[in-house]
Image (cartoon, rainbow, N blue to C red):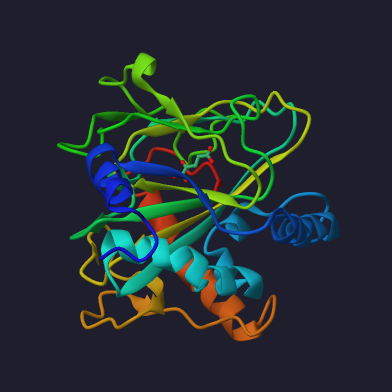
Amino acid sequence: MAKRLSQAAVTQFKGEGYHFPVPVLSAVEAAELRGRIEERESQQGGTLLPVQRNKSHLLFKWIDDLIRDPRILDFIEDLIGPDILCWNTLFWIKNQGSPSFVSWHQDLRYWGLDGGDVVTAWLALSPASEESGCMRVLPGSHVGEILPHEDRYNEANMLTRGQEIISGIDEERAVHMPLQPGEMSLHNARLAHASGPNMANDRRIGLSMHFIPPTVTQVQGDWDSAALVRGRDPHGHFHHTPRAKEDFDPVATAFHETATKAVHDILYKDANQDTKKL
Ligand SMILES: O=C(O)CCC(=O)C(=O)O
């Protein structure tokens, strides 16, 4: 019995690989969280460091709170069951007029995660529209083999290697996932997705949260970490991350260095270049 999603939505997610929009936060809450990240950016010269984009729940207490928020987890539980780990949290920020884009890719080609469904919740903290470069997905592409990718190392590409699916994408079938601040989209991490530049007059700020059941293992690296955010973890495949008690909590921040180094090595495994995007 699903907690938050209708049976039709669960069936659609299983068949098509995505579901949106899901209301999570009020517009006021979303604006407040946007203010927090922008305050941090302005304290350090206007931008987050690439490493701060990743595993951000270890640096910011409010993100650790978000990944445990029942308003998000009840939807995730409907898709992967009651035992839930959060593998990563990742900021996707495109400034107004920015050429930054994301090429067509499937996350599980590079993440090294195997043994269960990985669900990404992408939470909008500012308007994500077609004009501002919201995500678009290829329905049903999460089923079957991972498509062939090529590393294209494009500076404007937000992905570490500029990795891009080289065949099997029919743009005519792509579905855009526009979101208002406070709404999230859900997609299976095997689903092909992409996004274009931001041609709007506001920033496009999203936070993706990657949730896994405890059956999932890391097959690209010897060590990896995840936060246990609901239920139990009888498998212990991931080192459980400490909780940030405050922003830049010393223990969680020290752990962040180790945890992001491990993700860096996984994402750049066998890459020809380290583009310093993590
Ligand atoms: O934010 C974007 O445009 C792309 C996000 C993405 O690739 C992801 O969340 O997996």
* Picture residue at 34% right of the left edge, 34% below the top: 192
Q: Residue furthest top?
A: 172
Seen in the image, is 189 located left or right of residue 255? left
Seen in the image, is 64 located left or right of residue 19? right
Seen in the image, is 106 located left or right of residue 68? left
Residue 49 in which image quadrant:
bottom right
Q: Position of residue 221 (x, y in %)?
A: 29, 62
* Picture residue at 31% right of the left edge, 39% below the top: 191
Residue 182 vs residue 89, the one in the foreground? 182
Q: Residue furthest left?
A: 144
* Picture residue at 30% right of the left edge, 41% below the top: 17
Vertical placement of 59 versus 143: above or below? below
Which quadrant of the rendered structure holds the N terminus? bottom left
* Picture residue at 78% right of the left edge, 55% below the top: 38
Q: Position of residue 78 (x, y in %)?
A: 31, 62
Q: Position of residue 216 (x, y in %)?
A: 23, 65
Vertical placement of 19 versus 136: above or below? below
- Residue 261 visible: no
Q: Position of residue 170 (x, y in %)?
A: 32, 17
